[in-house]
Image: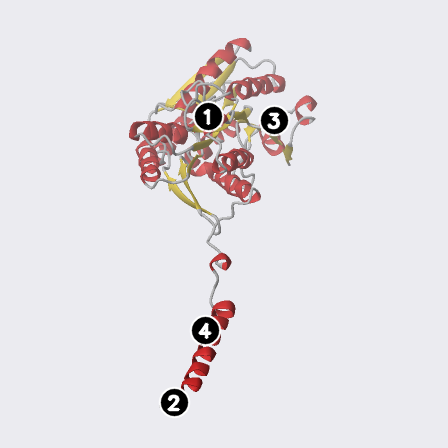
Amino acid sequence: MLPKIIIALVLVVVASAAGLWVLNGAPKTDQIKKPATVKRIGIVQYQKIFEPSIKGFKDGLAESGYKEGENVSYDVRLADGNKDKLKEGADYFLNQNVDLIFADSPESASSALNESTRSGKTNIPIVFTNGTNPDKVGIIKSFKSSGNNTTGVAVDFAAITTKKLEFLKRINPTIKKVGVVYGAVSDPTADFNMKVLREAATKFDINLVEYKLLKPPGPLSAQEAQKLVDSLKPGDFDAYFHPAGPVVNFPDTKKVLMGIGKKLKVPTVFTRDFDPKEESWLLSYGHDFFETGKQAAEIAAKVLGGTKPADIPIEYQKKIRLIVDLRAAKEIGVTIPESILAIADKRIE
């Protein structure tokens, strides 16, 4: 047997080595970095045309420190203009208990709000953008406070609609008949826009020549629109006003309706930007989807930081853009007055 002194020395060495491993090798509890909490955001997308708003939303949140793939994740459910799919998307995110739902339109916001109320999951916040007068369509109680689990960015379609008619009158003061094509599918944005348009038309001594598309948004509505445009003839109306709504703004349907100005040689006014390589529209006056998405991201950052949606006032869009397509003006033989050109944000030549 080893002498007791040697055994004691061995134990001391082993204990010392173990102590050094603990001090230098073993990870300390306070040195372990816990992964940052990843915020899960569900995006209820009504139509593909709202993709710029989604990009603006993601870019805006990134500027606020929420980086995709690091501390925030996104899941998108595209409804493609189908209200049943909107409901399914909202239900999915509510069942997933996401940290926040982003609604790209008043249709998405209404669906998400209705489903959260029905399911009792009103603790999940909803931030919307491109909200067509949300106080008028039942999304919020007031701009000061939604009174529920929503907040976001609204669009003043009443003011925009009136201004669009004013522009048409500036281009041609003798305009009396203005054509408008809208969808029969019930939709809060389209319904409100048409209501405002009818009221504003009387102020400008304008008679609306209304055409209704019966098919839901999709290839069938585009075919129906093509038949309508083919049937139009010069003199049916003096100008064309393109309204909001899912049916007439389905991409293929919208492109068909853009041919009205060229065929009838009348001024046309639209609401949003367009790709000048593929489309042509005399005037476009309205909010920018990308910018309203970024604006909504500023609000979402507050919500993710702990502020309740009802405590965040609803904002109107910060920017309205006027775009003039001088190519279209030349093609239909219309002169754009300097009073419009001087305030245009963009000219396409």
Residue 37, placed above or below residue 193: below
**How far apart in space, not on screen, are marks 3 and 2 (Cα)?**
112 Å
User: Crowding near pointer 2: few (<14 within 10 Å), some, many (20+)?
Assistant: few
Q: Nearer the viewer, residue 306 or 179?
A: 306
Q: Callout 4: 10 Å neighbours few (<14), some, many (20+)?
A: some
For the point 42% across and 32% down, the residue is 126
Query: Dot 2 corresponds to which residue?
Result: 2
Q: CA gap, disc 1 to disc 4?
A: 57 Å
Residue 286 rendering spot, x and y as whole percentages: 55, 27
Which residue position is annotated with label 1?
A: 310
- Residue 89 x, y percent position in the rendering: 34, 38
Q: Which residue is mark 3?
A: 333
Q: Is residue 88 left or right of residue 42?
A: left
Q: Quadrant of the N terminus?
A: bottom left
Mark 1 residue element: helix
- Separation of disc 2 and disc 4 at Cα? 23 Å
Q: Measuring from the top left, give residue 341's x and y in whole percent.
A: 67, 27
Q: Amino acid under label 3?
A: Gly
Marks 1 and 3, how far apart in space? 51 Å
Packing grade of label 3 (10 A; few <14, some 14-19, many >=20) is few
Nearer the observer: mark 1 or 4; the answer is 4
The residue to which callout 4 is attached is 18
